[in-house]
Amino acid sequence: MRISALKASMGEFPARTPLRTRVTKEFEGAGYRRQDLIYQSWPGMWVTTNLYLPLKLPAKMPGMIIVHSHHRPRTQAELQDMGILWARAGCAVLIMDQIGHGERIQNYPWNREPYHSRYIMGMQLYLAGESLLKWMVWDVMRGIDLLLERKDVNPEQIILLGAVAAGGEPAAVTAALDKRVAAVAPFNFCSAEPEWGEWESTRCLRRSLIDQFFPWIISASIAPRYVVYANEMGWERYKDDPGWAYDQRVFAFYGAPGNLDKAHGFGDFPGPGECSNIGPAQRQTLYPALKRWFGIPIPSAEPDDRRPEAELASLTPAIARELKMSPIHELALKFAASKLDEAHTEMGKLDPQERRREFLKRLAVKLGNIEPNRKPETIIHWTKVCAGANVDAVTVRVEPGIIVPLLLLRPANVSNRPTPVVVAVSEGGKDRFLTQRSDEIEALLKAGVAVCLPDVRGTGETTSEMHRGLNSEEESAAATEFMLGNTLLGARLKDLRSVLAYLSSRSDLDNDKISLWGDSFTPVNPSRFALDELIGWQIGPEVEYQAEPLGGLLALLGGLYEDKVQAIVARRGLVGYSSVLEDQFAYVPNDIIVPGILEVGDVPDIAAALAPRPLLIENFVDGRNRVAAETGLHEHFAEVFKSYSESPSQLRVSSELEPNLAQWLLRKLK
């Protein structure tokens, strides 16, 4: 059941197509030879690879695939060592570049630790309803196909080794899903503790927490085939991890305790025992199991004849031009566009009311749990009179452990009639509204309109002190929500809807005159950079800013799911999730990503479904945090204009900021 859930989270793999394997050059060394080759895992996806072979080919030999870490590509020294030593020992050893590394690099012009590449590709593939891990696993499966096309590779002896940092995940998942794998050693993977949310999506498998396919379950599912419980550092560090005991029990159940072994390095982390992939210390404890299970001899000495990394290249400029290797974002965009067209075609067959209901239903599935707490527990902590306004400091308890703090600013000099209210949300929270939108707030209060400033989870005073982007608490929270089958955007929508429920319960506020105002306070980027970099790790020559389109997205979604909302203002939102797939670089946070949203619709579809309620869309940005030009904006939102064709005065779409925002809101609230 757990592995079925893992399969479901991966989605359907593509159909097998011809590999079109091409050996681009060969090298003969002492006791081995190396083929530098390429193969096509599916149309448009080319894999650069080194295949190490014995100098004298046996009739049948083990086939090994080594999945490298996120530190370095396939040419790294430890990987060369393993290719050479096991080829000399009579094995066929395939070492490929993972997506985004080496000759398949997507973003940076250097190849060490391309974290940015994995971060961006993970978001882009999620939007398209795919996943980076799935694409990596498919490359490995096709690598197995490549080995088995050779008549001299023993189909009963396919061995996967997953290197210490993010190589273990694709190796273990491949072995769990592909019964052709006889043995796997997924380093740093088999722990009983589930990985918690972090920036690297391959470590945080979507739905892994809610569906409970934890690392140890994935590795144990491989029983009674061969598994090495492998760790980079000293075994003592992991002796208390119950994952090893769990695996032992599972293999004993199958009557195959001898098919489970362990390998490890030495020392603690950080320390001298660290490696980039799988070093000599780690291999020393791996050799005995490979000899016992497959008869692979233990080498008498480690290789000392590595080749310059440049020699191992599989591509030449001429071959690259001939193959026209598509960047990952282009392939993802094709996937997304096809799925989005299909969704539009299906929805177009429905009448308008049914179409809207179906769209809300499908979108809610992608967003996760967005149902509000209609009767949240609230506490008014204090009330003050400040600058002509009555200010309530309130906390709204959405669910256990989730408290939304808010300020409710009410006009001081109003009659006893309930007042309209504008609810303003942004990534920066209430403090940024008070400091940067004070004129608009003051104008609303003077006109007799209340203003509510909530900090939904992970925003304002509930946000992390760490930088945005990699390693922030919001990044971790977003990844954890994915593992729970939800999204952080959906959770924040739940918070906003719960706040609206609280406001609707107050007798001093007009429940029929509630508006949403989503905004952003981060600077936008120019049309071009001298050098693209990772947010938070920048060294120059320019500063790139990450978009914060949360406010605009929440305003649109809040209006979509709450019919009581009378008017919607969305500023500096995202022009479309598809825009995140239009370039190799993206400057959006992972906490606004919704896996598979482009299988249902995009931002213009959400906006179009708000008709005929008043809607102001302005200064929207694309996936690189650049303001969309007026002409492009109108073209992109063509469906929105169409949906407002019978009430055009209710819609304003502009690349510029409305100078009299308060007046626009006041007109629409009358």
Image: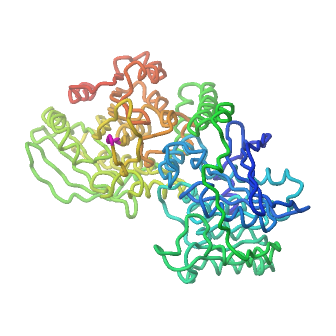
Residue 293 in the image: state x and y as whole percent.
80, 75
Q: Is residue 551 above or below residue 604?
A: below
Q: Nearer the viewer, residue 173 or 62?
A: 62
Residue 489 in the image: state x and y as whole percent.
43, 47
Residue 543 within the magenta-colored segment of the rendering? yes
Q: Is residue 625 above or below residue 58?
A: above
Asked if residue 362 lies left or right of residue 65, the reply is left
Residue 7 in the image: state x and y as whole percent.
69, 55
Identify the image quadrant of residue 444. top left
Q: Nearer the viewer, residue 345 or 74?
A: 74
Residue 428 within the magenta-colored segment of the rendering? no
Q: Nearer the viewer, residue 133 or 452?
A: 133
List the single residue furthest toward the right. Answer: 59
What kind of secondary structure does the magenta stretch mostly adopt? loop
Identify the image quadrant of residue 234. bottom right
Q: Quadrant of the C terminus?
A: top left
Which contiguous range is marked in magenta? 541-545
Q: How is the rendered protein coloured?
A: rainbow
Asked if residue 382 lies left or right of residue 493, the reply is left
Q: Nearer the viewer, residue 108 or 628?
A: 108
